[in-house]
Image (spheres, rainbow, N blue to C red):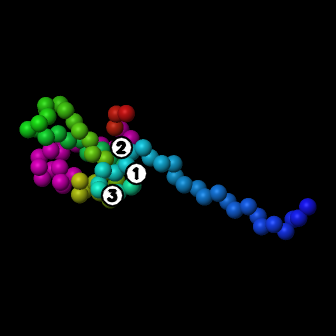
């Protein structure tokens, strides 16, 4: 038996993939926040659509929705209904 073989390399460890990914164009980061919004010209007052945001894009996406009067609330992604 040859014992001079190189030891086995440790397998790479990765974070488990998140099923919630940031909505910013081209961003692959897991979502940390849900930006709940609606367009009052199109949606009933209780209707909520959701954009997902990582910490880096939360402010940018919030400003975009707020400038149009669409943003209703920002919640933790963990608190979003599934």
Looking at the picture, does residue 18 appear above or below residue 6?
above
Label 1: how many Cα within 10 Å (few below 14, some 14–19, many 20+): some
- Report the number of numbered marks: 3
- The residue singled out by tag 1 in the image is 30
Looking at the picture, does residue 72 appear above or below residue 22?
above
Question: Which residue is at 19% across, 32% downward?
Answer: 47
Which residues are drawn in magenta?
62-79
> Quadrant where the C terminus lies?
top left
Q: Nearer the viewer, mark 2 or mark 3?
A: 3
Q: Quadrant of residue 6?
A: bottom right
Which secondary structure lies at badge 2? helix
Residue 18, given in percent of the width and then of the height, sits at 44, 46
Question: Which residue is at 11% across, 49% downward?
Answer: 68
Which secondary structure lies at badge 1? loop
Numbered mark located on residue 26 in the image? 3
- Toward the right, the furthest residue is 1
Q: Nearer the viewer, mark 1 or mark 2?
A: 1
Q: Are marks 2 and 3 in contact (CB under 8 Å)?
A: no
Residue 52, given in percent of the width and then of the height, sits at 31, 47
Q: Nearer the viewer, residue 34 or 19?
A: 19
Q: Earlier in the sequence, mark 2 or mark 3?
A: 3
Q: Nearer the viewer, residue 22 or 63?
A: 22
Q: Quadrant of residue 14?
A: bottom right
> Quadrant where the N terminus lies?
bottom right
Q: Is residue 74 visible?
A: no
Q: Are marks 1 and 2 in contact (CB under 8 Å)?
A: yes
Q: Nearer the viewer, mark 3 or mark 1?
A: 3
Asked whether 65 falls inside the magenta stretch, the response is yes
Residue 62, given in percent of the width and then of the height, sits at 22, 52
Numbered mark located on residue 54 in the image? none
- The residue singled out by tag 2 in the image is 77
Which secondary structure lies at badge 3? loop
């Amino acid at each position: 038996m040859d014992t001079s073989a190189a030891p086995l390399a440790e397998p790479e460890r990765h974070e488990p993939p998140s099923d919630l990914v940031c909505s910013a164009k081209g961003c692959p980061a897991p979502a940390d926040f849900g930006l709940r919004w609606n367009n009052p010209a199109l949606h009933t007052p209780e209707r909520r659509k959701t954009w997902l945001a990582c910490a880096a894009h939360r402010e940018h996406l919030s400003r975009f929705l707020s400038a149009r009067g669409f943003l209703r609330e920002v919640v933790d992604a963990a608190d979003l209904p599934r």
